[in-house]
């Protein structure tokens, strides 16, 4: 019985072996969401680095590293089907947000932010999205 015959009898043909499953497709969308959020966070950190944070000892190099790491993470999330990029997204988001919260409260490497700036809100939202999307991708891909 060929595919044409089986579909004529009301049985749909089997999907091609290379077709992605629904969970894999969702994980891909979540990975893209994490990647876009990582790039947003990276862009904010790079802008702040150029706006003067580069002159702050300790923190300046970390802002540049954050920008580079966000772009590298975004590329890995969409090109490497492994559990490490989503785990990296989770870590990136949590660590960056934790450092900022420390700078708002007790200080971080000598920097104490007096108030929440609009750029910090954009970066903070992006970092929450990176972390949550990374965690969701990890869970979905483990089930997959």
Image (cartoon, rainbow, N blue to C red):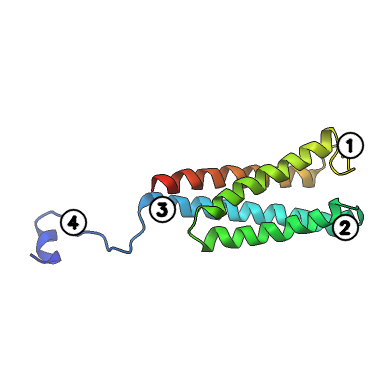
Q: Is 88 positioned to the left or the right of 27 in the image?
A: right
Q: Is 25 positioned to the left or the right of 12 in the image?
A: right
Q: Which residue is mark 3?
A: 24
In percent of the image, x 19 and y 59: which residue is there? 13
In percent of the image, x 44 and y 49: which residue is there? 141
In percent of the image, x 27 and y 63: which residue is there? 16
Sooner in the amino-acid sequence: mark 1 or mark 4 = 4
- Kindly report which numbered mark, 1 or 4, lies closer to the viewer in this rendering: 1
Q: Position of residue 128 (x, y in %)?
A: 64, 42
Q: Quadrant of residue 64?
A: bottom right
Q: Residues within 10 Å of mark 1 (few under 14, many from 20)?
A: few
Q: Residues within 10 Å of mark 3 (few under 14, many from 20)?
A: some
- Whether tag 1 and tag 4 are in contact, CB under 8 A, the answer is no
Q: Is 20 positioned to the left or the right of 94 in the image?
A: left
Sooner in the amino-acid sequence: mark 2 or mark 1 = 2
Q: Which residue is mark 2?
A: 54
- Whether tag 4 and tag 3 are in contact, CB under 8 A, the answer is no
Helix, strand or loop at mark 1: loop
- Kindly report which numbered mark, 4 or 3, lies closer to the viewer in this rendering: 3
Question: Distance between the Cα atoms at labels 4 and 3?
Answer: 22 Å
In the current view of this chain or complex, which residue is farthest to the top? Answer: 105
Question: Distance between the Cα atoms at labels 1 and 4?
Answer: 63 Å
Q: Position of residue 38 (x, y in %)?
A: 65, 53
Q: Position of residue 57 (x, y in %)?
A: 90, 53
- Whether tag 3 and tag 1 are in contact, CB under 8 A, the answer is no
**Which labelled disc corresponds to residue 12?**
4
Q: Which residue is mark 1?
A: 114
């Amino acid at each position: 019985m060929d595919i044409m015959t089986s579909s004529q009898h009301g049985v749909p043909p089997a999907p091609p072996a290379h077709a992605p499953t629904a969970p894999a497709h969702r994980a891909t969308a979540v990975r893209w969401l994490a990647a876009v959020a990582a790039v947003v966070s990276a862009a904010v950190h790079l802008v702040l680095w150029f706006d003067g944070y580069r002159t702050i000892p300790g923190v300046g190099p970390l802002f540049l590293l954050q920008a580079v790491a966000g772009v590298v993470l975004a590329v890995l999330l969409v090109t490497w089907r492994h559990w490490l990029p989503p785990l990296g997204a989770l870590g990136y988001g949590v660590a960056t947000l934790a450092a900022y919260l420390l700078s708002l409260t007790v200080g971080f490497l000598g920097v104490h932010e007096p108030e929440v700036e609009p750029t910090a809100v954009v970066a903070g939202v992006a970092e929450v999205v990176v972390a949550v999307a990374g965690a969701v991708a990890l869970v979905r891909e483990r089930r997959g």
